[in-house]
């Protein structure tokens, strides 16, 4: 006979201590603990080796630096790089997965856990937008605002000047900006690409008026 919900044994929610000397080390330590917990405490992971599990990786550079033991799972990530031999392009040193580091629980370092897999597998994974704060969408009809005329064909507000902007964006935003400027796309097609000085105004309001847009991490 099935037990009533209030009679069933209750399992305490797991928690893990994350090492914070390195974001990449700490995240891998956490992910390995999660895998160990799932594979030893429940039958579901081992039943299909994780193929029916879903992980969300929308942190800096997405799933590029998650442990190999999670590669069978479905990944929701915002970073769609498919090469196996990839290197970090982050502008934030704490997220640089090119550099190995160690802790008491990982005395041999953590990088050997992440090698040999792409950041994204189009066969099983899905690229999704990364997080933005709610104020970035305050003018969206989904937030109760009246729909606006989509009079902006393409919108991309970006950082251009710093070395970190070039490094983290792999030069893509600079190439887009140059293309728009050299071909006078703003006047021809109302394509708005530039930094806050060149494309002023409410980000959310401009977004709500755009047919197409690009989004950047920083």
Image (cartoon, rainbow, N blue to C red):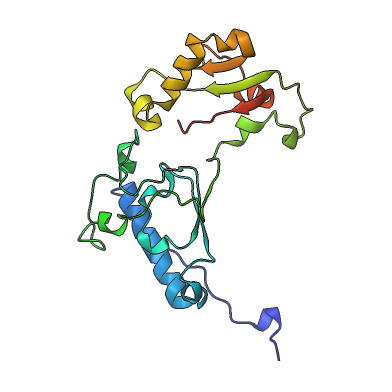
Q: Which quadrant of the rendered structure holds the N terminus?
A: bottom right
What residue is shown at x 47% (from left), y 33% (from top)?
Answer: 217
In this view of the protein, which residue sits in the foreground, 82 or 78?
A: 82
Q: Which quadrant of the rendered structure holds the C terminus?
A: top left
Drawn side of residue 183 relative to residue 206, left or right: left
Q: Quadrant of residue 3?
A: bottom right
**Place of residue 51 in the rendered image (x, y in percent of width and height, measured from the top left):** 50, 66
44 in relation to 155, above or below:
below
**Place of residue 211 in the rendered image (x, y in percent of width and height, measured from the top left):** 67, 26
In this view of the protein, which residue sits in the foreground, 77 or 159?
A: 77
What residue is shown at x 43% (from left), y 46% (from top)?
Answer: 62
**Residue 70 in view in this figure:** yes
Q: Outermost residue toward the bottom? A: 1
Q: Outermost residue toward the right? A: 146
**Place of residue 182 in the rendered image (x, y in percent of width and height, measured from the top left):** 47, 9
143 in relation to 210, above or below:
below
**Place of residue 184 in the rendered image (x, y in percent of width and height, measured from the top left):** 54, 8
**Residue 197 in view in this figure:** no
6 in relation to 207, above or below:
below
What residue is shown at x 69% (from left), y 79% (from top)?
Answer: 5
68 in relation to 158, above or below:
below
What residue is shown at x 38% (from left), y 48% (from top)?
Answer: 64
């Amino acid at each position: 006979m099935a037990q009533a919900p209030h009679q069933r044994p209750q399992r305490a929610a797991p928690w893990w201590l994350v090492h914070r000397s390195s974001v990449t080390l700490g995240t891998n330590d956490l992910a390995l603990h999660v895998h160990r917990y799932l594979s030893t405490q429940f039958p579901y992971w081992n039943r299909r080796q994780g193929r029916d599990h879903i992980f969300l990786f929308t942190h800096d550079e997405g799933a590029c630096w998650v442990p190999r033991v999670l590669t069978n799972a479905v990944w929701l990530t915002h970073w769609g790089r498919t090469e196996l031999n990839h290197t970090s392009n982050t502008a934030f040193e704490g997220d640089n997965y090119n550099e190995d580091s160690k802790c008491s629980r990982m005395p041999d370092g953590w990088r050997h856990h992440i090698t040999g897999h792409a950041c994204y597998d189009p066969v099983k994974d899905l690229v999704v937008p990364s997080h933005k704060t709610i104020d970035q969408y305050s003018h969206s009809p989904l937030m109760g605002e009246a729909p606006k005329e989509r009079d902006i064909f393409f919108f991309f507000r970006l950082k251009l000047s710093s070395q970190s902007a070039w490094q983290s964006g792999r030069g893509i935003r600079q190439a887009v900006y140059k293309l728009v400027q050299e071909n006078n796309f703003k006047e021809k097609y109302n394509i708005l690409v530039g930094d806050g000085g060149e494309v002023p105004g409410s980000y959310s309001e401009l977004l709500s008026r755009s047919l197409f847009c690009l989004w950047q991490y920083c």
